[in-house]
Image (cartoon, rainbow, N blue to C red):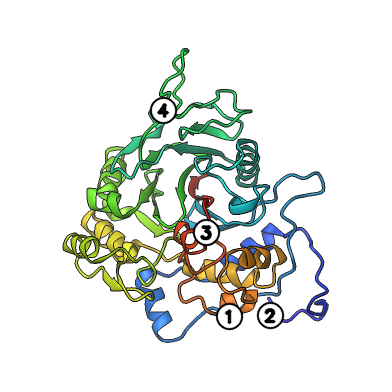
């Protein structure tokens, strides 16, 4: 696919058009699959993916005002797809702009519901959500899944008017026995057509599959969950359901990188004692931790070796470059209060495209704090087997 578009409009004369999601999928998937180690070596050698094609501005909604989500799909294994949502293509506004999928931070519930329904339509799958509490607890979704929302199964403890069952954060089970809230930080299933979702805005999503056994899993691996063993517990549940450790493949989703995750001496030392080599000195000058490296250590301990952990970065690089002239992303960057750089300059300073703080495609709690914003949205990392 050519990198030059002879019909491209002059700078400043771009008009919003609907994104061709199939074209974005083809562009993203054009990059070969690499393990995390292989991608790190390529980065050290300066081997970065070139821009694949020119981008146009993308309208966040269609002519009827419905969200048009911009997502990044990645084939993890035959029949198994991982999808990352971005900030683009939704109806949320203000600090939650635009494709916010979490309802705990103060966004209008109706907007969250519309965004989730648009995502389910985009995926051609049902979505499953649980209430993440920074634990090491996985749940067997095969025993729990039941349709209770227009987009699938909502057990995340959020009250969203319009769902068949309105969920209140303090209720666990309704009068008729319908499950409303499940406290957990990982989901495991053998069912097809159900996208297991992990909310994130700096914490690390870990997506896993044994395609031969038909077992998929999604884990929310923040600092506390990693220390408490959420990855090990998730892999154990996969094995209980028929997966084999030697067949499991995984990928790490967008998360704050070790150069940006500043935590202070005491926390960094304690984390490094559990995951040796994860202590960092951040770009802000203080001690930090590398939760991505910790996840790789935890996966290896659970029997998922590094040669079966594939990097999402080449695909994310491609998608970021595809969107390098997007008007909506440019608007969001201005609102991020990082000195008001042009979008191209902002993207040019990215060292880790998977880092939620560095890459403006992602929601980031830490970025919101630095910008003194009172709220921040949430993305979803999902895995679905067809």
User: Mark 2 or mark 4, which has the lower sequence index?
Assistant: 2
Instruction: Provide the residue designation for mark 4.
Output: 144
Q: What element carries label 2?
A: loop
Q: Where is residue 43 in the image (x, y as percent from the top left)?
A: 42, 80
Distance from label 3 to label 1 (Cα)?
18 Å
Q: Where is residue 281 in the image (x, y as percent from the top left)?
A: 30, 75
Left or right: residue 129 versus residue 226 is right
Instruction: Provide the residue designation for mark 2.
Output: 3
User: Quick one: label 1, few (<14), some, or many (20+) residues within 10 Å?
Assistant: few
- The structure residue drawn at horizontal position 52% and vertical position 52%, both measured from the top left corner, is 376
Distance from label 4 to label 1 (Cα)?
44 Å
- The structure residue drawn at horizontal position 49% and vertical position 48%, both measured from the top left corner, is 382
Q: Do the residues labelled 1 and 2 touch (CB within 8 Å)?
A: yes
User: Mark 3 or mark 1, which has the lower sequence index?
Assistant: 1
Instruction: Provide the residue designation for mark 3.
Output: 74
Name which quarter of the figure residue 65 lies in.
Answer: top right
Q: What element carries label 4?
A: loop
User: Does 338 sit above or below residue 68?
Assistant: below
């Amino acid at each position: 696919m050519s990198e030059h578009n002879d019909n491209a409009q002059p700078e400043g004369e771009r008009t919003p058009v609907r994104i061709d999601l199939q074209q974005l999928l083809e562009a993203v998937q054009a990059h070969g699959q690499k393990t995390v180690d292989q991608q790190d070596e390529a980065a050290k050698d300066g081997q970065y993916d070139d821009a694949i094609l020119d981008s146009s501005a993308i309208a966040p909604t269609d002519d009827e005002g419905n969200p048009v989500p911009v997502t990044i799909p990645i084939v993890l294994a035959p029949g198994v797809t991982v999808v990352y949502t971005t900030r683009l293509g939704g109806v949320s506004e203000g600090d939650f702009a635009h494709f916010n999928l979490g309802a705990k931070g103060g966004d209008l519930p109706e907007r969250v519901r519309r965004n989730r329904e648009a995502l389910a339509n985009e995926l051609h799958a049902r979505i499953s959500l649980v209430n993440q509490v920074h634990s090491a607890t996985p749940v067997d979704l095969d025993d729990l899944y039941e349709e209770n929302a227009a987009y699938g199964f909502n057990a995340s403890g959020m009250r969203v008017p319009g769902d068949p069952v309105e969920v209140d954060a303090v209720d666990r089970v309704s009068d008729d026995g319908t499950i409303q809230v499940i406290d957990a930080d990982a989901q495991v299933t053998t069912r097809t057509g159900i996208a297991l979702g992990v909310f994130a805005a700096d914490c690390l999503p870990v997506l896993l599959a044994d395609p031969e056994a038909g077992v998929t899993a999604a884990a929310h691996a923040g600092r506390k969950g990693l220390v408490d063993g959420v990855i090990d517990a998730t892999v154990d549940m996969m094995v209980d359901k028929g997966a084999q450790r030697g067949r499991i493949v995984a990928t790490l989703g967008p998360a704050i990188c070790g150069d940006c995750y500043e935590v202070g001496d005491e926390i960094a030392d304690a984390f490094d004692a559990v995951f040796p080599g994860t202590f960092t000195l951040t770009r802000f000058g203080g001690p930090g931790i590398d939760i991505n490296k910790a996840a790789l250590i935890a996966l290896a301990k659970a029997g998922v070796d590094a040669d079966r952990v594939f990097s999402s970065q080449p695909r994310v690089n491609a998608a970021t470059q595809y969107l390098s002239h997007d008007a909506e992303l440019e608007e969001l960057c201005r609102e991020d209060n990082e000195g008001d750089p042009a979008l191209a300059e902002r993207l040019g300073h990215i060292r880790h495209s998977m880092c939620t703080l560095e890459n403006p495609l992602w929601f980031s709690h830490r970025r919101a704090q630095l910008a003194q914003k009172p709220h921040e949205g949430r993305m979803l990392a999902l895995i679905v087997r067809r």
